[in-house]
Amino acid sequence: MRLLYVRSSVTGWDAPGDNGVVNSCFHSLPSGEDPSKLVPELKYIPRWSRRGVIRADHSEALLRAVNRERAIQSQADRDAMKLNPQDLGKITELTLEHYNRRAEDFWAGTRAHDVSQNIEALLHYIEGDPPFAILDFGCGPGRDLKVFAERGHLAIGLEGAERLAVMARAHSGCEVWQQDFLGLNLPDEHFDGVFANAALFHVPSVALPRVLLDLHASLKPRGVLFTSNPHGHNQEGWNGGRYGAYHDLDTWRGYMSAAGFVELNHYYRPSGLPREQQPWLASVWRKLAS
Ligand SMILES: C[S@@+](CC[C@H](N)C(=O)[O-])C[C@H]1O[C@@H](n2cnc3c(N)ncnc32)[C@H](O)[C@@H]1O
C-alpha cells in the first residue's frame, strides 16, 4: 500500500499529484472546508504544519473531489480576473477577519517555525553596514520581527489584522503599522530590506503590480525584497477562509521584473525534500538603482 502525504498547514490541504504523491495544489479544496467532508474516508488532521498520511486506496475519491473542485476553481479564476474595487475590499476584510478570529491559534501554530534560511537570505544581499532598516511586511504575531530587532536592526512590522498587530508589538517591542496591503502608505526610499514571508500570496493578482510598486518605492536604491509564497499553477481564489494567489516561478518573475526588481536568488522550501514536497517558493530581489 502506498502512502500519500497530506499536509494540514497555514496554506491548507495538499492533494495528490499524477504520481500519487501529494504536491502543492493548495487551491484544490473549497475555502474553509474540512476535506473529510468531501471525502469521508480522509482523516482530518487539524494541527497546523503537522504531516499526516492517508492511505492510497482513498486517493481515487480524493482525486475525483479535487478535479471537481478544479473545475469550479477555473471559473473562480475567470471571475477573479474581473474583480472590482469593492470585491478587493471584501477580500481584504474577510481575509483579515479570518486571521483576527484565529490569532491565538495562528501564533501557537507558527511561532516555532524556523525561517532562519529566509532571514539569512534577505540579510545576505543587503549592501552596506548594519544596522539595516527592515520592513517585516505581513509580520503576523511578530516572530521574525523580534529576530530582526534582536539582531540589532531597525525593524518595523506591517500587519492588517488588528489582533496580530497588537501581538506583534507585545512580542517584539517594535513599531507595527496597521495597514492594508492594498492601501499602503509607506515612506519613500526608507528601507534597506523588505521581508515578505508568507504574505504576498494574499494579494489578488489584479492588485499585485500596485503593491509591488509600493514596496519598490519604499526601498532605498539597491534595497532588497525577500518573498516566500506557496507556489502553484497561477490559480487564485478562496482557500480556508482566506484569499490566496498561487503563482509559478515564471509568473512570479514576470510580476517582479515589471515592478523594477532583478532576481538575486530563489529556492524552494523546506530544503532537502523532493520538489513535490516543497510548497514554498522563496525569492530574493534587488531594486535597480533609479
Ligand atoms: C500567512 S500569514 C504570515 C505571517 C508571518 N509573516 C509569518 O511568516 O508567520 C499572512 C499575514 O498577512 C496578513 N495579511 C493578509 N492579507 C492582508 C492585507 N490585505 N493587509 C494586511 N495584512 C494582510 C495576515 O493578517 C497575516 O498576518
Image (cartoon, grey):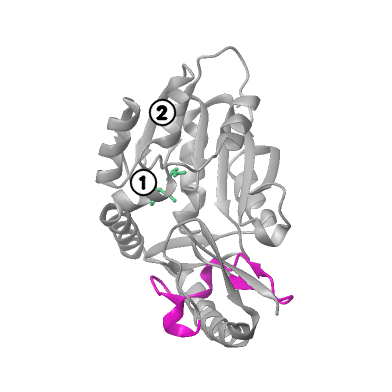
Residue nearest the observer in this picture, 206 or 174: 174
Residue nearest the observer in this picture, 268 or 135: 268
**195 vs 254: above or below:** above
Q: Which residue is depicted at the point 41% across and 74% down? A: 34
Which amino acid does the dot numbered 2 rest on?
Answer: Lys
Query: Which residue is tagged 1?
Result: 107
Is 262 part of what is drawn in magenta?
A: no
Q: Which residues are magenta?
A: 15-41
Instruction: Determine the image quadrant of residue 282.
Output: top right
Query: Which residue is tagged 2?
Result: 146
Q: Is residue 203 visible?
A: no
Q: CA distance from mark 2 to mark 1?
A: 14 Å
Q: Which residue is depicted at the point 61% across and 63% down? A: 232
Residue nearest the observer in this picture, 204 or 110: 110
Indicate yes or no: mark 1 CB to ligand 1 under 8 Å. Answer: no
Instruction: Determine the image quadrant of residue 231.
Output: bottom right
The secondary element bearing badge 1 is classed as: helix
Image quarter hosting the N terminus: bottom right
Residue nearest the observer in this picture, 73 or 210: 73
**176 vs 47: above or below:** above
Instruction: Determine the image quadrant of residue 156.
Output: top left
Q: Left or right of 31: which side holds 271?
A: right
Indicate yes or no: mark 2 CB to ligand 1 under 8 Å. Answer: no
Is 23 part of what is drawn in magenta?
A: yes
